[in-house]
Structure formats: structure tokens, C-alpha cells
Image (spheres, rainbow, N blue to C red):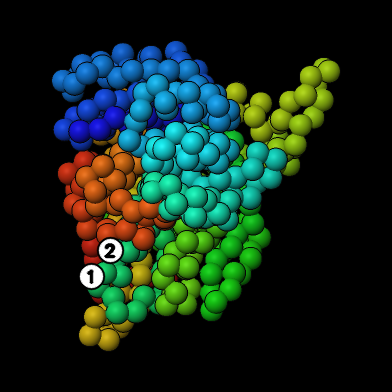
């Protein structure tokens, strides 16, 4: 029985609020706080007493402001904060957690607003502070990073004596009926996928041009989809925590229409993250673009199809023989919408964030310091995935295609 604050009332925050409300034996009181309180109120009203617990409380907070956050935390006294605002707020929320003595969880690593360069160094630098304060910070607990990292830890624990080749494969075979939309915050999404590609090989990072390496991969229940090597944040911690990996890559599917729109957006300067002067007012093109694109949290209604995300791993099994292992989850956009009113990408991120907080509150993932999710015991988390709407499947010694 514990109090929790969710920060961020977007698609992911909506799912976390639903799933926490469904698990009232673990989350006795829930507060949803965000920049725009009316969005929190709308989510709280939609959930209402649907799951038979106390109504979700709401609050307005500017998560860029440490003092405001500390005030909120001191008033509500949560055990843990689930940060599903934007990566720019990670450090201010971590600072506030240290002052108010609250534990922390997020789904995306810190990225400075003025530089599209996400990496863990800023948050790993909080290790001593959290350890000395006796607080836990759980980093990257969405689907990818998050479930993909737990899948890797589970594979290592139960199937491999030496993991050698890891390919994380992320397919969204859904159709939302829009010419162009992103499945999570457009600004963060476009900053991520327009970066140069990068993967780990033989102890070093190999850089590629954006979307340079691609091939069709077959996804369960979906079929072949063109998949592109991009850099994704969990690679940074996975190669550190599993040093036997000779190669680690991340593949994501993109449709031709999506890539064409992305190219045009870049070519006409709308992906710029530096401020420009427009009619005497400073605007950041990518932030303006976000304002005119469809809201990812509202794509769910007509979204059909499913996502399929997993890890394809090659190496030596517990007896030293060669083995291939594929572990994955498929998630239906329609089912996610029916349950929470949001699409599958928000769902696959919000469910693990709730489970991560549950792991902390139940004592499975509780140790002082700053940790990536693969550093905890994967087993209780894997068990909850099956119970909370993200069941997983495994294929042993199948063709990995990679
Ligand atoms: P949205 O843009 O839909 O929601 C973000 C929410 O944060 C909004 O409610 C926004 O407020 C709020 N917010 C932004 N800035 C502040 C601030 N300064 N103070 C308080 N609240 C603020 O994003 P999503 O829900 O799609 O994504 C949420 C997070 O999840 C992102 O960090 C994203 O990177 C991460 N993510 C992780 C994935 C994973 O698998 N690990 C996959 C997908 C997303 P307002 O409503 O006023 O704009």
C-alpha cells in the first residue's frame, strides 16, 4: 500500500494512471501532476471510480522547477515518482526527489533541450547522491528501453552462459489512418529518429548515416517489414552491463510514407531545435511542428494492427553450445485503446512503468543508487508482464535472420 505521483499527462501518463488504478492493492493513493492540470483532470475523470479505488488526485506542476516539485512532493509524500513527462525534466525531478527523499522512476534518459543527444552520463552521475540518501532511481522503464532490457537480463539469467550478438527489433505494424503522425511525443521522436545511426561492435561504437543499414525482417503474426538500424538509448547500458556482447544493434521499422515525410520535414528546416525569429517572436521549429501534428495520445480511436518488439540473441547456452533465442511481445492497438483510450505505443510504455514502480514498492527492485532496469532481478517483472497486459513469447533455436 503506497502513494505514488505520476508526472506527465500525455499518452503514457494516461496508461500509467489506468494501470496503477487497476492495482489498488499496491498503489493506495495516486496523484497525477502535469503542466496542464485540465489534462490531468480529464484523465482522472475518465478513470473515476472505474477500478473501485479512491479517486486520482491531480495537480499542476512545472517539472522544470525544482522548488515547485519539492513543494508538491512534501505535500503529498509519495513513496515513488513515476516520471513520464519529457526527458528534459529528468534531472530537475531527480533533484527534487533527493531533496524531498522520494524514489524515482522514468522511461527515457535525459537529453538537453538545446542538443539532440541523449545519453546516460547525466543521470549516472547521480549514483552517489541516491546511494547516500538511501533512495532508488530506476532508469528507462518503458518498453524500449525497459522491457527490452529486462528481456535481455532474463535471457542472460535463464538461457545463456555467454550472450554474443543482440539485436533488438521494434516493429509497429499499426495503421492510424493519418498521413503523418508520431506514436509518442513528436519532438522527442523526431529528434531520436533523425540522428545518425550507431551500434556496438567489438568493443566500440560504429556510426552510420541515418537509416543507412536496413533489411526486411519477419515479425510474428505480422510478416516482413523493412527494418532500419538506429541508435537507441538502452544499447548504452546493455553493452556496459553485459560485456560479453560482441555486437548490439537496434532495428526499427518505418514505412516509406513516414520516411518521406521525415525527409521533407528535415529538408525544409522544420526539425530544427534552435530558436528562430518569427514575426518578432522566438519559436523553435520542431516545437511549432509538434503543435500542428496529431496528438499521439489521441491516435487510438481508429488505430488498427499491432506492435511487435523483442530481442534476438545469439551466443552460448548454459552448457556452452550455440543457441539462438528470440523473446518478444505483440500488442494490439485496438485492445490498448479499448482498455485505456490510448494506442499501443503509449500502452507498451505505460504498463512497464507501472510494473517498475510495483517492483520497487514490493521490495523486488529496491536498492539505494541509480540503476538501469537490467540490473535488477528480471523474474518478478516478467511474471507481471504476463498479468498486466503484455504477455511475452519465446522461440529457441529459430532463424534470427541476423
Ligand atoms: P506527451 O508529449 O504526450 O506527454 C508529455 C506530458 O508531459 C504532457 O502532459 C506534458 O504537458 C507534460 N510536460 C511536458 N513538460 C512539462 C513540464 N515542464 N512540467 C510538467 N509537465 C510537463 O508524451 P508521451 O506521453 O508520448 O511520452 C512521455 C514520455 O515517455 C517521454 O519522455 C517519452 O520519451 C517516453 N517514452 C518512452 C518510451 C519507451 O519505450 N521507453 C516509448 C515512448 C515514450 P502538456 O500536456 O502541458 O504538454
Q: Residue furthest front?
A: 132
Which quadrant would residue 332 be assigned to in this image?
A: top left
> Which residue is rendered at x = 56% and y = 45% of the image?
110
From where the camera sits, is residue 171 visible? no
Instruction: Look at the numbered disc 1 and give the secondary structure of its residue.
Output: helix
> Which residue is rendered at x = 35% and y = 70% of the image?
313
Q: Could you say which is closer to the camera, residue 68 or residue 266? A: 68
Instruction: Look at the numbered disc 2 and give the secondary structure of its residue.
Output: helix
Q: Could you say which is closer to the camera, residue 193 or residue 361? A: 361
Q: Residues within 10 Å of mark 1 (few under 14, many from 20)?
A: few
Q: Using the image, tell me which numbered label, if any, was put on residue 154.
A: 2
Residue contact at pointers 2 and 1, CB within 8 angstroms:
yes
Above/below status of 141 relative to 84 = below
> Which residue is rendered at x = 29% and y = 30% of the image?
3
Q: How many marks?
A: 2
Q: Using the image, tell me which numbered label, if any, was put on residue 158.
A: 1
Q: Residue 25 in the image: state x and y as whole percent.
A: 16, 33
Q: Residue 237 in the image: state x and y as whole percent.
A: 47, 61
* Left or right of 233 on screen, residue 376: left
Which quadrant would residue 6 be assigned to in this image?
A: top left
Amino acid at each position: 500500500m503506497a502513494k505514488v505521483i505520476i508526472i506527465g499527462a500525455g499518452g503514457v501518463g494516461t496508461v500509467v494512471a489506468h494501470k496503477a488504478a487497476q492495482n489498488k492493492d499496491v498503489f493506495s493513493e495516486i496523484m497525477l501532476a502535469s503542466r496542464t492540470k485540465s489534462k490531468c483532470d480529464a484523465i482522472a475523470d475518465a478513470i473515476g471510480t472505474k477500478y473501485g479505488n479512491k479517486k486520482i488526485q491531480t495537480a499542476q506542476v512545472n517539472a522544470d522547477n525544482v522548488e515547485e516539485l519539492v513543494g508538491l512532493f512534501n505535500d503529498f509524500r509519495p513513496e515513488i515518482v513515476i516520471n513520464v513527462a519529457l526527458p528534459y525534466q529528468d534531472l530537475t525531478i531527480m533533484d527534487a526527489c533527493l531533496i524531498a527523499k522520494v524514489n524515482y522512476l522514468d522511461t527515457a534518459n535525459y537529453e538537453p533541450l538545446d542538443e539532440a543527444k541523449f545519453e546516460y552520463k547525466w543521470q549516472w552521475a547521480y549514483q552517489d547522491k541516491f546511494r547516500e540518501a538511501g533512495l532508488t532511481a530506476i532508469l528507462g522503464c518503458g518498453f524500449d528501453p525497459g522491457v527490452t532490457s529486462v528481456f535481455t537480463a532474463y535471457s542472460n539469467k535463464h538461457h545463456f552462459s555467454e550472450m554474443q550478438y543482440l539485436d533488438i527489433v521494434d516493429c509497429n505494424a499499426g495503421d492510424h489512418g493519418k498521413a503523418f503522425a508520431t506514436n509518442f511525443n513528436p519532438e522527442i521522436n523526431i529528434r531520436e529518429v533523425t540522428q545518425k545511426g550507431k551500434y556496438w561492435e567489438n568493443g566500440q561504437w560504429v556510426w552510420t548515416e541515418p537509416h543507412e543499414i536496413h533489411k526486411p525482417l519477419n515479425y510474428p503474426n505480422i510478416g516482413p517489414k523493412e527494418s532500419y538500424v538506429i541508435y537507441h538509448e538502452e544499447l548504452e547500458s546493455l553493452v556496459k552491463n553485459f560485456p560479453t556482447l560482441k555486437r548490439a544493434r537496434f532495428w526499427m521499422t518505418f514505412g516509406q510514407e513516414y520516411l518521406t515525410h521525415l525527409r521533407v520535414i528535415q529538408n525544409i528546416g522544420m526539425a530544427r531545435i534552435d530558436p528562430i525569429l518569427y514575426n518578432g517572436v522566438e519559436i523553435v521549429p520542431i516545437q511549432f511542428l509538434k503543435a500542428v501534428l496529431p496528438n499521439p495520445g489521441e491516435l487510438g480511436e481508429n488505430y488498427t494492427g499491432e506492435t511487435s518488439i523483442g530481442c534476438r540473441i545469439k551466443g552460448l547456452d548454459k552448457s556452452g553450445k550455440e543457441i539462438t533465442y528470440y523473446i518478444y511481445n505483440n500488442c494490439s492497438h485496438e485492445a490498448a485503446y479499448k482498455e485505456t483510450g490510448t494506442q499501443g505505443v503509449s500502452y507498451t510504455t505505460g504498463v512497464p512503468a507501472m510494473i517498475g514502480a510495483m517492483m520497487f514498492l514490493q521490495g523486488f527492485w529496491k536498492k539505494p543508487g541509480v540503476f538501469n532496469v537490467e540490473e535488477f532481478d528480471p523474474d518478478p517483472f516478467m511474471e507481471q508482464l504476463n498479468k498486466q497486459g503484455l504477455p511475452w513469447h519465446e522461440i529457441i533455436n529459430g532463424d534470427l535472420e541476423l
